[in-house]
């Protein structure tokens, strides 16, 4: 199970007699958030005789080794990573996301249903051609002022922030493991992020050479951080 998950509107007339008994279980699962929904789907597939295998078990190179793969660590990145880990743990308990932006020991954005790249795109320049389309989609969520204001109402931006990404605590890692890729790296550079920090063993990095090259050219850091690392 890999790729984005969508929840299309369901036409009851399209549900056949064999599927109808599953509807109640699916509805109950969907009421428990993304992880609960995926657990419910996995249970139904296993009941039907399928064996669910994680993408990274089939392709272990998708998970990079721990270490600093681009740029350099700074004391502030280390401090912001600690807060990022705490934030994702809190978000995970309510099943609301797997990524956040932290700047100077302050959380300035949290991932929602639009995803990580849309969150970052909110902080990219309006004239950035790469992120214009993503930003337009994110515009459905509200005005830029709502995204770019701090707790005290003062405008903030993402320059000098880090993207922190990690799995939700106790999630079933056979599905919905967090992912970053070249688009994420380009977005981070466009938004002026200091770097990207991902949990070692818990985040898939697609096209690692390209991600590393993009961040390295911008002088940004890529830290594959062990959980609980300082």
Image (tube, grey):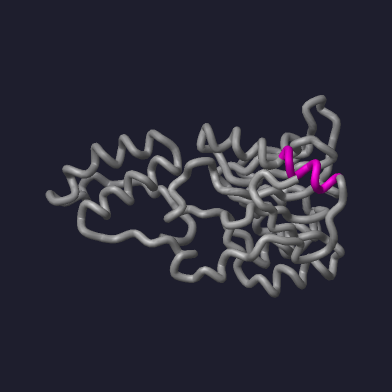
Residue that sits furthest to the top in the current view: 152
Q: Quadrant of the N terminus?
A: bottom left
Is residue 6 visible in the rendered image? The answer is yes
Does 132 sit above or below residue 105? below
* Residue 63 x, y percent position in the rendering: 58, 64
User: At x 48% / y 60%, what residue is drawn?
Assistant: 3
Decide which of 193, 53 is in the foreground and name it: 53
Q: Quadrant of residue 24?
A: top left
In this rendering, the count of numbered labels is 0
* Residue 192 visible: no
Closer-to-camera residue (14/67): 67
Highlighted range, magenta: 76-83
Image quadrant for the C terminus?
top right
Question: 193 or 43: which is nearer to us?
Answer: 43
Residue at x 27%, y 47% (from the top left corner)? 11
Q: Position of residue 49 (x, y in %)?
A: 21, 59
Q: Based on the displayed image, in which of its 4 quarters is residue 190 positioned?
A: bottom right
Query: From the viewer's perspective, is 33 left or right of 18?
Result: right
Q: Residue at x 36, y 45 (%)?
A: 39
Q: Please check the rendered image and state whether residue 78 is part of the magenta-colored stretch, yes or no.
A: yes
Above or below residue 19? Residue 181 is below
In the rendered view, would you say 151 is above or below 145? Answer: above
Coordinates of residue 163 in the picture (x, y in percent) = 72, 50
Where is residue 206 shown, x and y percent of the image? 60, 68
Q: Residue at x 57, y 54 (%)?
A: 202
Main structural element of the magenta stretch: helix, strand or loop?
A: helix
Q: Is residue 33 left or right of residue 77?
A: left
Magenta span includes 182 = no
Q: Is residue 158 left or right of residue 47?
A: right
């Amino acid at each position: 199970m890999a790729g984005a998950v969508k929840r299309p509107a369901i036409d009851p007339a399209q549900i056949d007699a064999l599927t109808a008994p599953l509807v109640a279980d699916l509805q109950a699962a969907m009421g428990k958030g993304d992880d609960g929904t995926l657990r419910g789907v996995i249970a139904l597939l296993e009941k039907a005789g399928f064996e669910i295998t994680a993408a990274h078990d089939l392709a272990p190179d998708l998970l990079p080794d721990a270490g600093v793969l681009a740029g350099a660590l700074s004391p502030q990145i280390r401090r912001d990573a600690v807060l990022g880990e705490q934030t994702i743990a809190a978000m995970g308990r309510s099943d609301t996301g797997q990524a956040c932006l932290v700047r100077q020991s302050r959380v300035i954005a949290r991932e929602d249903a639009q995803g990580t790249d849309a969150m970052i795109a909110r902080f990219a320049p309006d004239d950035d051609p790469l992120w214009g389309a993503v930003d337009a989609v994110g515009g459905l969520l509200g005005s830029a002022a709502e995204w770019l204001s701090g707790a005290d109402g003062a405008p903030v931006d993402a320059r000098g922030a880090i993207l922190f990404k990690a799995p939700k605590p106790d999630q079933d890692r056979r599905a919905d493991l967090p992912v970053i890729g070249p688009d994420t790296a380009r977005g981070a550079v466009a938004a002026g992020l200091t770097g990207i920090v991902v949990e070692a063993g818990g985040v898939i990095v697609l096209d690692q050479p390209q991600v590393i090259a993009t961040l390295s050219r911008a002088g940004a850091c890529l830290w594959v951080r062990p959980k609980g690392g300082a």
